[in-house]
Image (cartoon, rainbow, N blue to C red):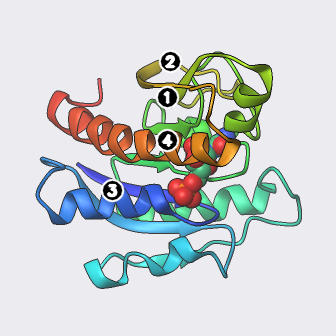
Amino acid sequence: MRFVILGSGTGSNAEALLKAWDEGKLGKAEPVAILSDKPEARILQLGKPFGVPGIHVEPGPFRTKLSPEGEQAYIEAIRATKADLVVLAGFMRVLKEPFLEAFPNRIINLHPSLLPSFKGLDGIRQAYEYGVKVTGCTVHFVSGELDGGRIIDQKVVPIERTDSLEDLELKVHAAEHELLPQVVRALAEGGLE
Ligand code: GAR
């Protein structure tokens, strides 16, 4: 199962996927490219030691979505990689039709909360400020609804009374770095259906 990673920033989750793959822990799943809307993003450099190309794809002039031309550019770039699965790991733009129709049931997203709680931006901060006692992370199929598609798997992170926001961020990210490779491996083993 060939997969492509889309991200906008640090890429610690892309790194976790690449490391898991390098260590033979992804089963039949194989990363084939990393795409980013930000030409300077760290994520674009991460595949180099593994022979996985990082490609900047122009998103168009909007801040939180793709322009129609940007959408086509992403669809073409993904098709060129012959990927079976698209993994959104910190890709900070909302995807809509026709992008979703181009890869039906083939796009998954990582979100830093236990959905359906704390959708949208800053999921970790939202949970921290609300004062919930457990949060975590979710991998779900991407639908037209923001952070609303079918949930594949989740990992729980308890919030201790002494945790600062920074402590919680570290814990949720650590949970993400375990969850995302597990899900990608499971999808490769079980088939995407
Ligand atoms: C991750 O925490 C991911 O859950 C979040 O962005 C971060 C990317 O980190 N995604 C969202 O908030 C999507 N709504 P990374 O670049 O280090 O992998």
Helix, strand or loop under label 3: helix
Pointer 1 residue: 141
C-alpha gap between disc 2 and disc 4: 24 Å
Binning the other alpha carbons within 10 Å of mark 2 as few (below 14), some (14 to 19) or many (20 upward) gives few
Query: For residue 123, what is the image quadrant?
Result: top right
Pointer 4 residue: 171
Q: Position of residue 71 (x, y in %)?
A: 69, 55
1 or 4: mark nearer the eye: 4
Q: Residue at x 30, y 63 (%)?
A: 18
Helix, strand or loop under label 4: helix
Looking at the picture, does residue 193 appear above or below residue 8? above
Name the amino acid, label 3: Leu
Binning the other alpha carbons within 10 Å of mark 1 as few (below 14), some (14 to 19) or many (20 upward) gives many
| Marker disc for residue 17 | 3
3 or 2: mark nearer the eye: 3
Query: For residue 162, what is the image quadrant?
Result: top right
Answer left or right for 159 relative to 39.
Answer: left
Pointer 3 with pointer 2, Cβ within 8 A:
no
Q: Residue at x 58, y 36 (%)?
A: 112
Name the amino acid, label 2: Arg
The tag earlier along the polypeptide, 1 or 3, is 3
Name the amino acid, label 4: Lys
Residue 98 appears in the rendering: no
